Amino acid sequence: AQKVTQAQTEISVVEKEDVTLDCVYETRDTTYYLFWYKQPPSGELVFLIRRNSFDEQNEISGRYSWNFQKSTSSFNFTITASQVVDSAVYFCALSEEGSGGSNYKLTFGKGTLLTVNP
Amino acid sequence: AAGVIQSPRHLIKEKRETATLKCYPIPRHDTVYWYQQGPGQDPQFLISFYEKMQSDKGSIPDRFSAQQFSDYHSELNMSSLELGDSALYFCASSFTSGRWGTGELFFGEGSRLTVL
């Protein structure tokens, strides 16, 4: 069974600090996708990044960066110079192929609540 | 760009009543998913449809049913509502081309159901 573990349930930082959100996953699939979603207090799920299992290159997008390490089954997310607007719940997710064979579904971690204080 | 549209955004029902949620996927997306997120929980997969046929089923109660129509919109029907059904219900859509497609689910803004 697929599993995603986000060990940090809550993190609190002061504005401009860097913060890393951890994600560890388990899967027996050789082909899979990893995702990060942001859920602000308003409730919508905002897509941040998708990474497939064959691409271990780290990625940077503005203040966001992701470190994918297949050897440790981790896909960590770092926010540099955090801002109050970054306050949200962040979910790491893993896709697995659905039983239908032609689609897939996401397994989410429990989420990390990030609070950035001014 | 068009996104996934869900309606209604908020719904309040009494116990034992019935509720219907609607989802309009992004045009040309062939797969629709329903997720349920309880308070303080992570989203849980309920059911999915590929090309209007049910393709996978998760932890969906027997009191719930769903279908995808010819225009690709989907409806989630929930009967005999219980207090525990109070949650945020997300619909997502994706384009599945071949085995893996784009590997991305696009989520709607969610429908918040409150059962009193």
Image (cartoon, coloured by chain):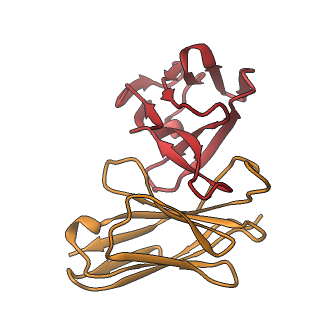
Chain colours: A red, B orange
In the rendered image, which quarter is residue B114 located in?
bottom left
| Residue A73 image position (x, y, % from top left) | 55, 21
Residue pictured at 54% horizontal, 47% vertical = A106
Instruction: Using the image, determine if residue B58 lies above or below residue B104.
Output: below
Q: Judge left or right: residue B51 versus residue B92.
A: right
In the orientation shown, which residue stands out farthest toward the top?
A71
User: Which of B55 and B76 lies nearest the eye of the viewer?
Assistant: B55
Q: Quadrant of residue B71?
A: bottom right
Q: Tell which of B93 and A20 is nearer to you.
A: B93
Q: Is residue B18 left or right of residue A85?
A: left
Residue A54, x across and y down, in percent: 74, 27
With respect to residue B17, does B74 lie above or below? above
Residue B59 placed where, x, y %? Answer: 38, 59
Compared to residue A72, the image places residue A76 above or below, namely below
On the question of residue B75 being in view, the answer is no
Q: Can residue B27 be seen in the rendering of this structure? A: yes
Q: Quadrant of the N terminus of chain A?
A: top left
Please provide percent x and percent y for residue A113: 39, 36
Residue at point 63%, 83% (across, down) = B69
**Considering the image in quadrants, where does the C terminus of chain A appear?**
top left
Residue drawn at the location 43% of the way across and 58% of the way down: B58
Q: Is residue A23 left or right of residue B26?
A: left
Depth check, front residue: B2 or B24: B24
Number of marks: 0
